[in-house]
């Protein structure tokens, strides 16, 4: 699901709201989460999961094409950890069972 599909689904579930208002709300929520992560804060949505920022130290990497050593700078990586309720819902729905059986 992409953001526009999320907006459409929320607008369908709430016919008293205009689609443009729903889009403004979704953008405001996502921008607020992004701003909090940029400040280094942790964002927890109970029953859904938690967003946080993990720092990767600077290191020596390798160019896979040439094999030459490359300096890789420090990076901030966004991390999402699902909440307990979300994991239970996914497991109850059987999500991912077909993919592991096919391997």
Image: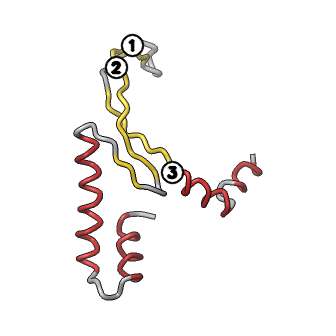
Of badges 3 and 2, the one in the foreground is 3
Image point (41%, 12%), residue name: 68
State the residue position of label 2. 72
Query: As drawn, is 33 to the left or to the right of 8?
Result: left
Residue 56: quadrant of the picture: top left
How many residues crowd mark 1 within 10 Å: few (<14), some (14–19), many (20+)? few
State the residue position of label 1. 60
Vertical order, 2 against 70 (above or below): below
User: What quarter of the picture does the C terminus occupy?
Assistant: top right
Indicate the position of residue 57 as horizontal and vertical percent values: 36, 20
Q: Earlier in the sequence, mark 3 or mark 2?
A: 2
Check disc 2 and report its element: helix, strand or loop.
Answer: strand
The reply to whether dot 1 and dot 2 touch (C-beta < 8 Å) is yes
Q: Earlier in the sequence, mark 1 or mark 2?
A: 1
Vertical order, 86 against 20 (above or below): above
Q: Residue furthest right?
A: 101
Check disc 1 and report its element: helix, strand or loop.
Answer: strand
State the residue position of label 3. 83
The reply to whether dot 3 and dot 1 touch (C-beta < 8 Å) is no
């Amino acid at each position: 699901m992409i953001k526009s599909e999320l907006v459409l689904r929320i607008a369908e579930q709430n016919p008293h709201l205009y689609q443009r208002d729903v889009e403004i709300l979704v953008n405001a929520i996502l921008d607020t989460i992004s701003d909090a992560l940029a400040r280094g804060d942790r964002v927890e949505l109970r029953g859904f999961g938690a967003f946080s920022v993990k720092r990767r130290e600077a290191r020596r990497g390798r160019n896979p094409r040439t094999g030459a050593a490359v300096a890789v700078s420090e990076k901030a990586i966004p991390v999402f950890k699902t909440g307990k309720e979300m994991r239970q819902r996914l497991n109850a729905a059987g999500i991912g069972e077909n993919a592991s059986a096919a391997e």
